Amino acid sequence: MTVASSTLALAAQLSDLRARGCLTVTVDGHTIALFDYGGKVYAVDNRCPHMGFPLDRGSVRDGILTCHWHHARFDLASGGALDLWADDVRAFPVEVRGDEIWVDVAPHADPKAHLRRRLRDGLERNLSLVIAKSVIGLAQADEGAVETFRAGLEFGARYRRAGWGPGLTILTCMMNLLPHLAPEDRPRALYHGLSAVARDTDGMPPRFIVQPLPGISEPRFFELKRWFRRFIEVRDAEGAERCIVSAVRTGATPQQLADMLFAAATDHRYIDAGHPLDFTNKAMEALDIVGWTPENAELVLTSVVGGYADADRMEESNAWRNPIDLVEILERTFRQLEGLQHEGAKTRRIDEQGRQRLVAVLLGDDPQASVDALLSECREGTSGVDLAGVVAYAAALRIARFHTSNEFGDWDTALHTFTFANAVHQGLRRTHSRELLRGVFDAAMSIYLDRFLNVPAARIPVPNGKVHLSLGDLPALLDRQQQVDAAGEAVAQLLYQGTPPREVIVMLGKLLLREDRDFHTIQCVEAAVRQHEFLVGTPEAMHVLIAAARYLAAHAPTMRAQGQTFNIAQRLARGERLFEA
Ligand code: FES
């Protein structure tokens, strides 16, 4: 091969290579394997791109170089991998001058573009190691987290016919948690989120976005919103998606679009245990991150619609109908709400006493009293956002006081209510939607139904001056199973001792990321951190972190296999050897 380059470097003598068939040389910091094959000289990076095994210990047959660890195959001439999980190995151009072998060690033309392509490979083929290596490489190349997140969002929203699911929710949760994590944990968080998207889309058919109504140009938001709700009512996802796309194309604002979706998501009671509404909130948070361009809004918002159309409705649930007909109570209440002026827009703040009173009622055993208390606050002009915040806090208390004598699966019951209540709270901060206000009442009914999870109630820890803990005590605690009460106690004592809450959150994030991805635990920690932001400076703020620590402890330790994959990628990035000689 003739190379015209000033970056050529003398690598070896041809006669030496011919004598041995393969030589390993170091040129300008690169360890290169030279092969004499079929009368030609080839040079490739000696480090297998999969997990670093020396390729000079591989074998060449029919122009294919095979690594002898996991048997990845490469085209010897170009370095291109024939097993995509392994990545292409770098092949260096070679020039032979008499008995001298010269190789061109010019740097890669565009390493970021290569890493982005590899991230795409990892997403397409559900390859966690490839995703981990790409995320680490992109972070080292100063690619912003938003761009990496965007790649996962676009992929997940397009390549899963069922639309928005746990994978994209985890990815968005992780992105929301990013500022609260230690800098070294941020790539790991993105890796978890992106891997969850890859797993969710693996083997799934793609989704095709519908076109807007033909020739539509004038804003027809109210008509489209009305149709959208009607189509969801009859479980027609396609017609509903077309309404969204048409609304986007005719200039509907993010607030209007939120209003449209949240209305349909709350037209029936607590659909699918709150998942569709939570997913909708997360989809909008994802758009906040990447920007509400028409293209993004169409792609992302249409992805949640299938979840509305297919959802179970609590009108059909025995628990919501018997022995007390909660649906009837709610419908009666909603009729009264309609008579009030523009509820969502009210701005009176609830005071501390009012909060405590309301929480006590919400945690009681009288559903009528719960809705009456909320309705009364609405009549007083209390803001929907504040009411939603109080309800979300009460839902977190169900977890903070969850007794471990319950069945293990009941953690999920309490979790669903909390994440739903958190989503309603976040949604009302986004749009003063009269319809979404119904979600506050739905969450209150779910808190009522969850009351048995606090019988007996676990004790909220009180200050214990006799113990002194450090943050470093938490990891060992969560190395053992079922340290639920101890974890809640430890977090509480740390906070009572004066440990800054942000440091406790950093540690909770670290502990979350070392476990295998669990959708609900990630949701719980993320919602608790969000709620903590609103409660910071109040005694209640501690309780949501206790809830997060208890839920995390209940679901730890896991095998931590996903973390091991990330650790391998990190070691490879540092140039460490993973194999024994
Ligand atoms: S195939 Fe080469 S290290 Fe795994």
Image: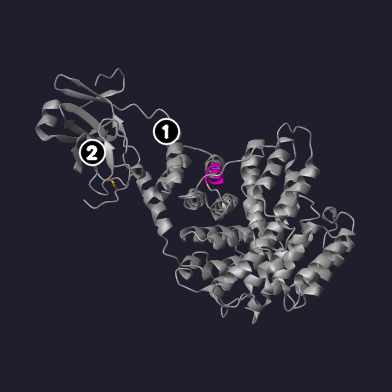
Query: Relative to residue 314, is residue 161 drawn left or right?
Result: left
Q: If you read the primary sequence from the N terminus, does the residue marked by circle 1 or circle 2 appear first? A: 2
Viewer-closest of 237 and 377:
237
What residue lies at 66% left-to-right and 60% top-to-bottom?
532
| Furthest residue toward bottom | 456
Is 555 above or below relative to 432? below
Viewer-closest of 509 and 552:
552
Amino acid type shown at disc 1? Pro
What residue lies at 51% left-to-right and 50% top-to-bottom?
197
Q: Which residue is mark 2?
A: 65
Q: Main secondary structure of the magenta part?
A: helix
Cα distance between the residues tagged 1 and 2: 23 Å
Residue 396: image quadrant is bottom right
What residue lies at 46% left-to-right and 60% top-to-bottom?
516
Q: Is residue 142 magenta?
A: no
User: Does dot 2 land on a helix, a strand or a loop?
Assistant: strand
Query: Relative to residue 551, is residue 89 drawn left or right?
Result: left
**Residue 194: image tag:** none
Is 322 above or below relative to 393? below
Q: Nearer the viewer, mark 1 or mark 2?
A: 2
- Image spot of residue 381 (x, y percent): 88, 59
Q: Which residue is mark 1?
A: 111
What residue range appears in magenta? 153-159
- Image spot of residue 107 (x, y percent): 36, 29
Position of the N terminus by quadrant: top left
Query: Is residue 353 shown to the viewer in this render?
Result: no
What residue lies at 70% left-to-right and 55% top-to-bottom?
234
Within-10-Å neighbours for mark 2: few <14, some 14–19, many 20+: many
Q: Is mark 2 within 8 Å of ligand 1?
A: no
Viewer-closest of 24 and 3:
3
- Image spot of residue 347 (x, y percent): 84, 55
